[in-house]
Image (cartoon, grey):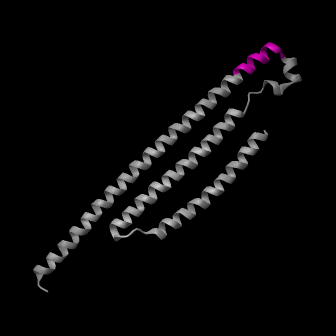
Amino acid sequence: MNVQSLITEVTGRAEKFAAQGQEVATIGFDTLKTANSIVLESATTIAKTNADAATAIFGDAKVNFEKATKAGVQAVIANPVAYIPATTPAVEAFNATVQTLLDTKGELVKTFEGGYSTIVATINGTPAKKAVKAAAVKTETAVKSTVKAAAKTVKAAAKK
């Protein structure tokens, strides 16, 4: 091999890797943009849900306080439970938040798996399905344990 053919071969390979690198960077950036919009939308939904629940609880507490003030100390001592605000808005907000987080997780997993598969396909020419399936199994296991823990917390809160 002479020097000229060696330089030509190295240049051709370097251009191929540079093109792949540029494409991988573009795919990664697009994936992160999509994930950012998903997270932003979910955070907005959660904030609105919890703000509405807080407003409802505060309003109920204010009404019950006024009711207790009018009834007097003896009436409150006789039946204190009647003057406690309802916990239903808080429990519903918690359940809605858990569901929103689970939905968000699912969307993010799909987004990142799709981005990863596209990057692997760009580099290798074929998608890496085994790695994507393994990540999905790990994620599913984590989701199941989180859902069980959330269900226990909701049951405990509902009892109180």
Q: Residue at x 40, y 51 (%)?
A: 32
Give the position of the N terminus as an image quadrant. bottom left
Q: Residue furthest bottom?
A: 1
- Which residue is most to the top? 70
Query: Where are the magenta residues, as a range?
Result: 62-72
Q: Which residue is at 76% across, 44% downward?
A: 156
100 relative to 28, above or below: above
Q: Taking 64 as reference, is 37 above or below it?
A: below
Q: With respect to residue 101, does 109 lie above or below?
A: below
Of helix, strand and loop, which mostly describes the magenta segment?
Answer: helix
Give the percent coordinates (x, y) of residue 104: 53, 48
Q: Is 107 in the magenta?
A: no
Q: Using the rendered view, name the quadrant where residue 155 is placed.
A: top right
Residue 157, picture quadrant: top right
Q: Position of residue 122 (x, y in %)?
A: 33, 65
- Where residue 65 sits, quadrant-wise, is top right
Q: Residue at x 71, y 46 (%)?
A: 153
**Left or right of residue 152: residue 78:** right
